[in-house]
Image: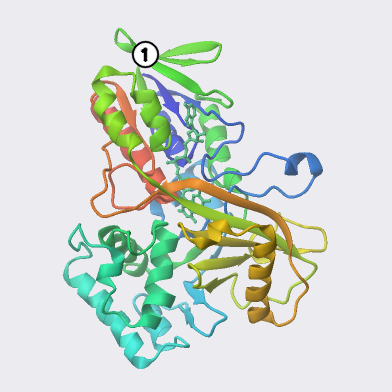
Amino acid sequence: MNIGVIGGGWAGFAAAIELARAGQRVTVYEAGKVLGGRARRLASPQESTGAPALDNGQHLLAGAYGESLRLMELVDPGSSDAAFLRLPLALVYPEGVSIRAPRLPAPLHLAAALLFARGLTLADKLAAIGFMRALKQVNFAPAPDVTVAEALADQPVAVRRYLWEPICVAALNTPVEQASFRVFARVLKDALTGKAANSDFLIPARDLSALFPEPAAAWLQKNGGEVRTRTRIRALQRAGAQWKAQWDGGEAGHDRIVVATAPAHAANLLAPLADCQALAGRLGAIDYQPLLTVYAAYPALPRFPAPLLGWVEPAPMFIFDLQACRPDMQFGMANGIAVVVSAAGPHLEWDDARWVEEIDARMRQAFGPLPKPRLLKRITEKRATFACRPGMFRPSVKTPCAGLFLAGDYLDGPYPATLEGAVRSGVQCAQTLLATS
Ligand SMILES: Cc1cc2nc3c(=O)[nH]c(=O)nc-3n(C[C@H](O)[C@H](O)[C@H](O)COP(=O)(O)OP(=O)(O)OC[C@H]3O[C@@H](n4cnc5c(N)ncnc54)[C@H](O)[C@@H]3O)c2cc1C
């Protein structure tokens, strides 16, 4: 079959690779000039100035991202190790709390992390263990209509603030008052049960396009596929048994189409198709949460106690030590940092001057007197991820239009909007497409 995949993000490439592996001829269409979608290297102006390429937002993967690591390894052997700084779970707050998992077999690594956690009382630690036990009793599948805030109501304040809420907001990119407890429970299950390595933090040591989408594109081209960047598909049309994908100045026929875009873009493509209008309406109604990254640099910095440090006000905030994570990213004699704040909050209103003050205050708390940071770039991705609410609509990969399939982080599945959720949806899409053909 000749299959068109619309969208060169992680979901699109996961689908494309699995389809090509099954012997299908695949063309990936990507509207942008850089591959990777919401996890990509920024194209400009860094390229022209010779400054290091920044990403559209600092990402963090987990050891439990099995499908992402499998496909990375397939297209670029060795990369699932070499492309990351891997460290055992470490929530380190200069305010005084520190929860670090030692390199021990599961579940001892977590027991030790809690037992030796700094800044939590014994009652806090027992409450956290009790919370996990209660989740285990329901097989990590609590009632679907509960929010994380409701589920955490009985947890002590320190455990909420320094353990569960930062993990929830970082993983679901949704404030706890709105976040789905069922999805959060699944994240906890995959990260905190099973092998100890599942809870590892994997910090990209390459830019996000080089991490998977570009090696995936190279693999696809070597295996008979095609990748067309700067090609925005404007319309899809049924032409007999085939689909026609149309872009400015061209069109191509395909036996099957995979729409692997964010839901709003999928809604635009599906809306003119009579059988898909209702689905398009529901996709168009999905709401989003933002994600903010600030890149900054210092003339020099002391060694970080961990490659990422956390704060909890005004929302969970993490500062990544780029010197430790990104050996390819050199700012001359300066140390780079990436500050990440997930989900909506008052921080979205802060201007550059306020950010300099906020970063300065936090870095001084961690390291003592320092010169002021130099802001490199502040990026707000307004529609970074879907808002992961209880009972939200998540469609299946099949659409009411024969031969037209969906992939993307928002599709029905146990995961929040993450790279792993995107990759899993792509793999599932390819399997369903092949099974129904
Ligand atoms: C700032 C930020 C930080 C994040 N941090 C993390 C993190 O730490 N860990 C984590 O796991 N996840 C994180 N995420 C979420 C993760 O990046 C996304 O879940 C994932 O990238 C979504 O992939 P996707 O393939 O489903 O969609 P997308 O990445 O949106 O890919 C869709 C692609 O389709 C293209 N497209 C759209 N319309 C058309 C068209 N008509 N024709 C052709 N192409 C089209 C787009 O240009 C895009 O490249 C973060 C997201 C953001 C924005």
Q: Indicate the quadrant containing the N terminus: top left, top right, bottom left or bottom right.
A: top left
Residue at position x 24%, y 30% from top?
A: 435
Residue at position x 17%, y 61% from top?
A: 143
Q: Name the amino acid, label 1.
A: Gln
Q: Position of residue 6 (x, y in %)?
A: 44, 27
Residue at position x 77%, y 57% from top?
A: 331
Left or right, 326 with respect to 314, comes to right
Residue on which disc 1 sits: 237
Number of other residues with Cα within 10 Å of mark 1, as a class: few under 14, some 14 to 19, many 20 or more: some
Q: Indicate the quadrant containing the C terminus: top left, top right, bottom left or bottom right.
A: top left
Depth check: give the residue in front, 379 or 183.
379
Q: Is residue 154 above or below residue 141?
A: below
Q: Position of residue 31 (x, y in %)?
A: 54, 28
Quarter of image, res 178: bottom left
Q: Is disc 1 placed on a helix, strand or loop?
A: strand
Depth check: give the residue in front, 388 or 63.
388
Quarter of image, res 151: bottom left
